[in-house]
Structure formats: structure tokens, C-alpha cells
Image (cartoon, rainbow, N blue to C red):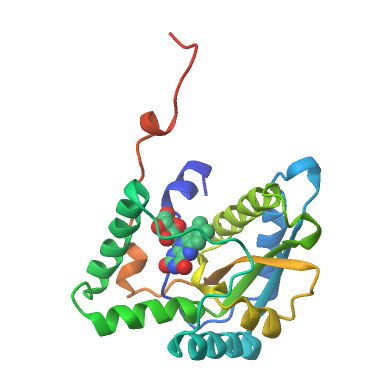
Amino acid sequence: MEFEELVKQRRSIRGYKQTPVPKEVILEIVELAIAAPSSMNTQPWHLHVVTGEPLDRIRQGNTELMMAGAKPQREIAAHGAYEGVHRERQVEIAYQLFDAMGIRDDKIMRKDWMMRGFRQFDAPVSIVVTYDRALDMATIGHFDLGAITYGLCLAAWDRGLGTVINGQGIMQSGVVREHANIPEDEVIMTCVAMGYPADEFAANDVRSTRVPPTEVATFIGFD
Ligand SMILES: Cc1cc2nc3c(=O)[nH]c(=O)nc-3n(C[C@H](O)[C@H](O)[C@H](O)COP(=O)(O)O)c2cc1C
């Protein structure tokens, strides 16, 4: 796929076929993703690719804790609720997704939608993205993980696979750590759901908006 087409076509996928994803295909994707730049080429990342029973145990553990009203237990620092333009953009994409699924005014189905995130969107694969704990107090490692994670999403899309970066999936990081067997010297940053997109899942067609480039970029010293 041409780069521009790939970037413009990719979008988050939140409904998946149950078709397994071959390990070889995931390895090809990882090979492309690790071409990402990192600070001083430190490559502080690790990818824990989980499927089958261990993934089902993560879904179950997350669901039980969230249903019981457990507080989030992330390993990365959390910000408070989004405000201002950030809140407006958050609400916009949420309404786009709810409207596509026809659940904007349905409280029960909205809760069910939220639980899908804790179930890793019922995807056949979840990739837990971690960094070396030795870098924990610095944010540069987070930057590096953003690069590899976007690479994963693009390389997957190029092979007909969908992804969604899934902050909800690591909200109960203890559960993920236990069942994905994450070593203690790594910090859990996020996870990425991956699989072949389900054809009839309306939210998969949602196109999120972007602030125009002329507002994002400030040009200095040009004519
Ligand atoms: C760090 C991060 C965490 C995210 N967590 C979630 C999540 O928990 N649930 C979800 O549905 N989407 C999640 N997303 C996906 C974003 O909502 C999505 O990337 C954004 O709305 C832009 O849409 P697009 O990916 O379709 O371009 C996350 C994305 C990032 C980068």
C-alpha cells in the first residue's frame, strides 16, 4: 500500500473476527515496528503478544474488577479528567462511535461498550507494550513507545489487520502483568488489540476528525 493511502485509511478497529492471527504475520509486523526511532537508539520497548487462554484470563480478570467498581491501577502516571478542547475532542469521538452503534441514548449499551475495552475488544490478540523500568522517572521512554506503537498499527493495517491502542485494557495492570507474565523490571505502558476487522461492525467505519494542519503547525521564518 502507498504510504499516504496507508496513513489515511488506517483507523481504530473495535470489532474483530475470531480468526486467529498467525504468529509469522505478527513477527513481520513487529519487524517493521521496531524500525521506529528511539532516544539514542536505546530501544527501551518490549512487546508481549498474548492470545488464547491467557488473553481470556486477562479479559475475565479485568471484567471482574471493573464490574466490582475497583479503582484503576495503571503503572503509568494518570492525568485528571480532560478539560477544554481535549474534553470536546474526547466527547466528539465518543458520540461518533455511539451514534454509529446506535447506543448514544442507551445507558446499558454504553456501559456494555465500555466493558468491551476491558475485554480487549474481544480481539484474538492483545499486544502489551512495556518499557524498561530503569527509565521509569523519565518521559523519553514514553515517547519511544508511541513511535513503536504507531508503527505496529500501520504495519498491521498494511497486512489487512486492524488495531486499536487500548488504554482501558491496562487499567487493571496487575491482572495484565499476572496473566501476560510481565517481568518486574518492565513497566506496562499500554496494550494494542489486534485482529481481522469484523465486516458488519459499524464503529469500524468511524473516521475521527483532526485539527487542520494549519492550526497544528506554526511556521516561523517563511515568507
Ligand atoms: C494512548 C491511547 C490510548 C487509547 N485508549 C483507547 C481506549 O481505551 N478505548 C478506545 O476505544 N480507544 C482508545 N484509543 C484510540 C483513540 O480513541 C483513537 O486513536 C482516536 O480516537 C483517533 O482515532 P483513529 O485511531 O481511528 O484515527 C487510544 C489511543 C491512544 C493513542
User: From the viewer's perspective, is 22 left or right of 133?
Assistant: left
User: From the viewer's perspective, is 63 left or right of 47?
Assistant: left
Q: Nearer the viewer, residue 91 or 24?
A: 91
The answer to which image quadrant residue 20 occupies is bottom right
Name the residue at 28% across, 82% down: 109
Q: Is residue 108 above or below residue 149?
A: below
Q: Is residue 12 above or below residue 16?
A: above
| The C terminus: image quadrant | top left
Where is residue 30 drawn, in percent x and y?
Answer: 69, 61
The answer to which image quadrant residue 158 occupies is bottom right
Q: Nearer the viewer, residue 151 or 143?
A: 143
Where is residue 114 drawn, in percent x and y?
Answer: 38, 77
Q: Nearer the viewer, residue 35 or 133?
A: 133
Q: Is residue 214 above or below residue 193?
A: above
Judge whether residue 150 can be spotted in this image: yes
Where is residue 63 drawn, in percent x and y?
Answer: 49, 87
Q: How many marks?
A: 0
User: From the viewer's perspective, is 200 left or right of 48?
Assistant: left
Q: Nearer the viewer, residue 107 or 102?
A: 107
Name the residue at 59% across, 85% down: 58
Q: Residue furthest top?
A: 223
